Amino acid sequence: MINFNYDTRILLRHWWYDYRSEVCFALVLAALTVIGYRLSEHIPEQIFETIVNPVQYICYIVVCLCGAVLLLRHHEDIVMRRTWAGVLIVWCVVDVALLCLRFVNLTTIGVAGSEPLISASVVIGNILGWMLYIYPTQVLRPGWLNWWRGLLQVLPLIVLGVIDMFVDFDLRPIIALYPAALFVTLCMHVRNYRRWCEDNYANMDNIDVQWIVRYLAMLLLVGISYYYIIFSHAPSRLFTQQWLMLFMLAYATEQILFRPDPWARSISHTAPQQSAVSPTAEADAEEEALSDDVSADEASPQPEPNEVNAQRQQIEQWMETARPWRDPNFRLEDLRKVLPKNRSYLSQLINSAYGCTFYQFATRYRIAEAKRLLEADGKTKMQDISAACGFSSPTVFSRTFVRETGVTPREWRNRG
């Protein structure tokens, strides 16, 4: 039998092993931001207006256009990719318009000179910034954001911009800080998203919350940079903010293009196959089913206490005989083979019976098997042990083993 006493001290002691890449990413991004601001101080205003800024807009257009085409032509037409493709298309159109205005000398867009930005420019910039919140909202709260909720989020920006035209009081700080409220709201849902992933998947590789944290960190830096250029009088104040945005759009597009959508995968795993349905209709049906499925999960009844012991024995017997956790794609839905219940019921059953998430539940079987293989044979390669235990890669195996045991697999083998 597996010991299910969960030692949270190991998680706290080895958090650096799990999150070092995120910490390094944040430090590098912050360093690039500081370097960019320092460089912008040495760019003559004339060169920035005639060369640097137009080049930045051209790069925007290329990245957004190519990214949107790649996302829309992807063989998996899922909501997450269509959402980001729509954001890129809007940014591309806006940048084309701004570039055309600049070339016909109608405006310099009021961002590179010494004057502060007017409220209208702040409102337009914030609306474009609001569009960057659509993707994480779709990931963290699938099916929640629709056209009228989006309108309600944008409406305060427009109202504040109109009021600022008729009052002497400067409302730009309030307008600029409005997206911060949306940012805080998204951060509050990150923990629930992680819990949902761990309750439904035995493998967090490429679908965990760390990518969303990275995305939100980029949003925060871009927001701080934008707030600076609103009130700064530096001639080249837009330089760093533009390159930060370009990096964010390119990096996010690359990640979203190859990153699976856990919500869509969970829905498609149990949805009936309908070959006669067109890809667009299928994607729309997936979005509707996803929203309904989340609502159904929230309303699902709790497992009865008198049923928990019997169902726990069924699950443990199946886990030890069939050993489904050896499959890297093992997920909560697979428990339906022994318990024909809905996903929310199975998740609550694991939580109440073992005091952990489904991911932690499956991980303990995998770690127990890994310990057995490490102690049984001192010559088996780590790659073979990783595959035999159901880990997606040796790196994931090593990271998980350290988190659960406090030592690396090699150290465990040598200690035996």
Image (cartoon, helix red, strand yellow):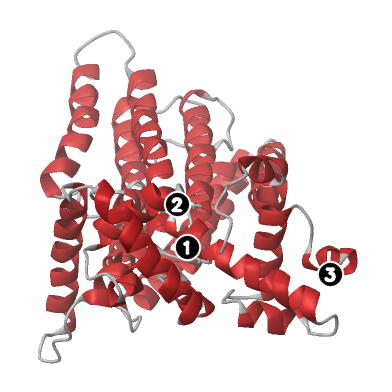
Residue 8 % position (x, y)? 61, 42
The local secondary structure at tag 2 comes to helix
Asked whether 116 or 188 is in front, the reply is 188
Disc number for residue 413: 3
Amino acid type, residue under disc 1 in the picture: Ile
Which residue is at the far top?
168
The local secondary structure at tag 1 comes to helix
Specify whether 250 is left or right of 172: right
Task: Look at the numbered discs 2 and 1 and tell me whether their residues touch, using CB distance below 8 Å.
Answer: no
Q: What whole-number distance in Å separates the C-alpha atoms at marks 1 and 3?
A: 55 Å
Amino acid type, residue under disc 2 in the picture: Tyr
Q: Earlier in the sequence, mark 1 or mark 3?
A: 1
Residue in the picture at 56% in, 51% down: 243
How many residues crowd around disc 2 within 10 Å: few (fewer than 14), some, or many (20 or more)?
A: some
Q: What whole-number distance in Å separates the C-alpha atoms at marks 2 and 1?
A: 55 Å
Question: How many numbered discs?
Answer: 3
Residue position for label 1 = 58
Foreground mark, 1 or 3, reads 3
How many residues crowd around disc 3 within 10 Å: few (fewer than 14), some, or many (20 or more)?
A: some
Which residue is at the far right?
414
Specify whether 9 is left or right of 102: right
Residue in the picture at 19% in, 76% down: 271
Residue 311 makes an appearance in the image: yes
Q: Quadrant of the N terminus?
A: bottom right
Residue position for label 2 = 354
The local secondary structure at tag 3 comes to helix
Asked whether 173 or 24 is in front, the reply is 24
Foreground mark, 3 or 2, reads 2
Amino acid type, residue under disc 3 in the picture: Arg
